[in-house]
Amino acid sequence: MKKLVIGILAHVDAGKTTLSESMLYLSGKIGKLGRVDKKDAYLDTYELEKERGITIFSKQAIFDIGETQITLLDTPGHVDFSAEMERTLGVLDYAVLVISGADGIQGHTKTLWHLLDKYQIPVFLFINKMDQEGTNKDKLIKELKQLEDGCINFEDETDGFYEQLAMCDEIMMESYLETGRIEMVQMKEAIKKRRVFPCFFGSALKVEGVEQLLHGIEKYATIPSYPNEFGARIFKITRDEQGNRLTHLKLTGGRLKVKDTLTNGTWEEKVNQIRLYSGEKYEVAGEIEAGSICAAVGLSMTKAGEGLGIERAIHTPVLEPVLSYQIILPKDCDPRVMLPKLRCLEEEEPQLHIVWDEQLKEIQAQIMGEVQIEILCHLIESRFGIPVVFGDGRIVYKETIADTVEGVGHFEPLRHYAEVHLLLEPGEPGSGLVFGLNCSEDILGKSWQRLILTHLEEKAHKGVLTGAAVTDMKITLVSGRAHNKHTEGGDFREATYRAVRQGLKEAKSVLLEPYYTFQLELPERMVGRAMTDIEKMCGTSEIAQTHNGMAFLRGSAPVITMRNYQKEVAAYTQGLGRLFCSLKGYEPCHNAEEVIESIGYDSERDMENPTGSVFCAHGAGFLVDWYEVKNYMHMEGYLKEKTNLPKEAVGNKPTQAEDRWISLEEVDKIIGSISYANQGRKSGWKKRKTALENYYESISSGKAGNMGIQKETREEYLLVDGYNIIFAWPELSELAEDNMDGARMKLLDSLSNYQGIRKCRIIVVFDAYRVQGHLEEVIDYHNIHMVYTKEAQTADQYIEKFAHDNQKRYNIVVATSDGLQQVIIRGAGCSLLSARELKEDMEEASERMRQEYQSIQENKRNHLIDNLSPEAKQQMENLIKEEKEK
């Protein structure tokens, strides 16, 4: 049988569900007409849908017209549930757009028209409620042509009808000029290509004009053809009353059988059951063919919008939530227990965007509006038995950039390596994030390039102004490097994320906020008041038309300033005014500085989204801030004139990662000689202070052998991070696998010998923070001190505190290979030794001691020989010579 998937879309209260009911009744699917106001509509099955008289969740019904099987998808009309509607668009063959003849084209209708154009879905129009007084078909046709010239009345095939068709397409024009008529195949093709939009008029409630619509669909719709290769588009996830997870999909190629294995390349699962739903009821099928809509049971990893087989993922939704709310739980409900349950709802409603704010210890949800809040509260309580309320809504901001920059990310702790160069370019408004490749495989292998693109796509990247999601930007991979032995997949994840953030810090970031496009209908005498209000809202408006004492204003304004204006309009117009709003998209924020300051986001303190990179020197990783990364990077930059670096800074740049080392004095010099853009500040360009000015007096960055060269004579302390050193020295690390006590004692013995040579105070710190109730313990081991930290205190914390409290009294050197710890200690004004440097210095000190001892012994022996008689001296020399010859 021929198969066709049709969706019904409309502005709320246009009569969409009533039309669905009439279509099912005329096709013989149902024997009695249900009504929304009587709460017995066939497709409004959810309790709240019956109570509110609106469609909340998309439903489906299957019926036949002649030889064509139609799967009808009834979608929500309320703007709060438009994301649910949009998810169905990716699986439609045709759409029926319902317009109220009494109200005409409203704001949300234009949003729907834009979406249908974006998804390139052919459209039939049904102008409903034509039985009401004041409706005028000719006037409505003129209004419909504001949407598209191809909107044509298909009820009467007169000469004028063919003339209108001919104006829509060159092929039809040629046919009409030659024969005076247009062939059916030409009309069907023009409708399929969205050049013609058939219009039908009637009353769904009285079942008038609906039969003509059904015949029009059967007559003019083209049945799609599908390939033999398997393909499917997933558009929805739900759960039935028993809690079974249902994956709603359209088969776009091949066939699907029960027990077939499906995969997206990451997961692989079997289909346990295939359901064909019609309203609340369903039939079980053993096999379905392409063109069918079904619900598959047994799949736990699927996501709405995902493509399987030959299908790619469905486009990023155009309609996004613009408000964020705190979900307030009962006092006895642990948020961390509730979070996984809400994640299940997020699967079914992806636009929910459930977020756990670690800092505030609260759950937040991004949703479309007030009506959706009521539905969610009801859903959460009915499913999980937990009553929740939503706090005050906050606007969801976004960020983009205004210039092109190159972002560099480097991740090179010990035995790891990855470097990524990304080109960040401003995108068109509403384009979202677009990813591209412009990298030679001679530079970076194809598999690594694909991995980097995967990492770019898997995360919602945060901006640097407020931490809001980044949008309207193109990110292109232009260069990168891997190591034959040391690169792992996770290394490129770190380098990729850091490259995005480093680029954003260099770029001129722009804060974006959501805007409404609106249509305001009100008495003419109140136009001045309305336009003044809109101007105060930082919006724009114009008079579209006036008619019978009423004026129609069109324009746009920020969501935050206009979100409650509907109540105000109703008040000052005594109920005569009507405001229709729909989401226009994101535009530059009208009060960006105020918002940035109120949010107080510090991008450089966001440890989960670092802006700097990790480099390696002398066997240890160390952190480099974003504004220095390009001085340390190992590869040539993609943008030749990317910064105004002084020649002396550029001259320090290495070419090989293995040989890279910059002393701390050089780092201070580079910090002091370079300035970068620091976005998000009122001052724009800002010269950063040198590390010397910010943190510490310059002291020796060399090895422990230089510790005594100071401006003043102060007692020296060497603090050793015990376990860090043990696992950094191969001989101790191997020993620790079998005998940690033995490794500790060997380290202590070595340091005890070292103290005898260096004559400084040595403190070796070991973690005991996991030992419940443990108190800080200090033990003297020969000539050194050994510290076991107290409960909940790490060795890092102990060392940081000691360094902070005593750096002015003592010359402190810390031995650790922890990169973050090194930066903190350096900031406290102390010297550093990596594990490798400590070992080298201990070996050098021991060698010097051995050589001094041999020299002393040699001097003693020479002194004895000098006091012998010539005969005895000659005899001794002969004995030494004979001994050497042996």
Image (spheres, grey):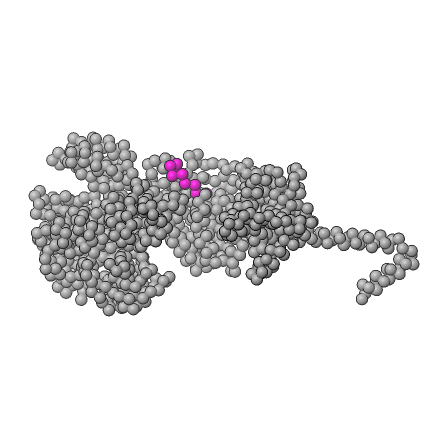
In what quadrant of the picture does the N terminus appear? bottom left
In the picture, residue 533 is in which quadrant?
top left
Q: Which residues are magenta?
A: 596-604
Kindly identify the residue that appears in the image at 17 percent across and 63 percent down: 69
In the picture, residue 565 is in which quadrant?
top left
Q: Nearer the viewer, residue 546 or 399?
A: 399
In what quadrant of the picture does the C terminus appear? bottom right
Kindly identify the residue that appears in the image at 10 percent across and 60 percent down: 31
Kindly identify the residue that appears in the image at 55 percent across and 38 percent down: 695
Up the image or down, 579 lies above or below 51; here it is above
Up the image or down, 829 lies above or below 45; here it is above
Quick check: 89 left or right of 440? left
Kindly identify the residue that appears in the image at 87 percent across and 53 percent down: 866
Residue 219 % position (x, y): 13, 60
Quick check: 346 left or right of 667? left
Q: Nearer the viewer, residue 630 or 678?
A: 678
In the picture, residue 252 is in which quadrant?
bottom left
Q: Specify whether residue 34 is in view.
A: yes
Magenta stretch, main secondary structure class:
helix
Residue 686 % position (x, y): 47, 36
Counting the numbered discs, the total is: 0
Up the image or down, 280 lies above or below 505; here it is below
Quick check: 648 left or right of 158? right
599 in the magenta segment: yes
Residue 527 % position (x, y): 19, 32
Q: Specify whether residue 215 is in view.
A: no
Residue 791 % position (x, y): 51, 49
643 in the magenta segment: no
